[in-house]
Image (spheres, grey):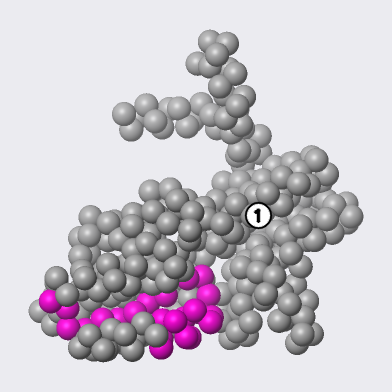
Amino acid sequence: MRIKHILILAALSALLLPMTASAQENKTALLMVHFGTTYDETRSKTIDAINAKAAQTFPELTLREAYTSRIVIRRLKERGIVRETPLDALLRLRADGFTHVIVQSTTLLEGAEMESLRREVASVEGFFEDIRVGAPLLYDVADCAKVAEILAARHADATDARKKAHVVLVGHGTYTPATATYSQMDYLFSAQGNPLFHVATLEGYPTFETMLARLKAAGARRVTLVPLLFVAGDHVTNDIAVDWKQALEAEGLQVDCRLEGLGEIPEIQDIYLDHIRYSLHHAPVDIMKKKQEYAAGKD
């Protein structure tokens, strides 16, 4: 089955058009899209860092950036820092004469933020010859498995079976079905031989309560909280390092916090760059066109 799957992907790839030719004409832009943060230090370590890395990796592309959080944009504007929304950034690119755009978000999964971004892109796609949206960090099982491996290796020193020391990765969560991605991540840690790692969310599932129940069942004595978030901003400073820490300590656990955003980790940055690279060489498959081909017997 795996060989068949690879052959199908190869066949599809042969039909896809690269954007590299247009990039060489300097009419192709890379729009890096971030939720954003008002915390200057973490912005420098995450957003600015991946922007710089992307610019260095793809020098043939003109890099621009946008923020999706209107609250963050408004608060930064009050401090004299201007950030555009994705729609404003795309309209500016069009006005500047760009005909091809790769849009890459640093969001984690296909939740509400990606839905909003895709709608904004769809509203202006007629203004460009080609515009492509890259996948978020945890797009498929392979992405999730890779991220789980990276995080397990990075925080292995915080776990100890004899001392009952566990790690809890805390994500934001979403109200969309994409919240299942967090449960998938939780499962993958155990499947990859890292049962002392757990995943929980602030506003989704798994919840604080389900995570706490698992810790109690395992007899945990010590917990290290780690953000499963791109930036270590307000949620990390207040929700994780204060509220969750205090709540776990009230349950008799010894709690440490590692306040590092995913965007600070070079290996995580590289996954986003791989998604940009894929978008450059592969146009998205139009499923309705594929269905028409299947109906016509072109399988």
Would residue 256 be found to the left or right of residue 103 on screen? left
Residue 30 vs residue 298, the one in the foreground: 298
Badge count: 1
- Residue 28, how many percent across, how many down? 76, 50
Q: Which residues are magenta?
A: 219-242
Q: Is residue 50 above or below residue 58?
A: below
- Residue 18, how many percent across, how many down? 66, 39
Quadrant (top left, top right, bottom left, bottom right) of the N terminus: top left
Would residue 54 be found to the left or right of residue 232 on screen? right
Identify the residue at horizontal 47%, vertical 32% (top origin): 9
Kindly state the secondary structure of the residue where label 1 is placed. helix
Q: Is residue 125 above or below residue 299?
A: below
- Residue 65, how many percent across, how many down? 71, 65
Q: Which residue is mark 1?
A: 117
Indicate yes or no whether the magenta region holds residue 125: no
Given the image, on which type of amino acid does mark 1 rest? Leu
Q: Quadrant of residue 293?
A: top right
Identify the residue at horizontal 80%, vertical 61% (top origin): 88
Outermost residue toward the top in this view = 297
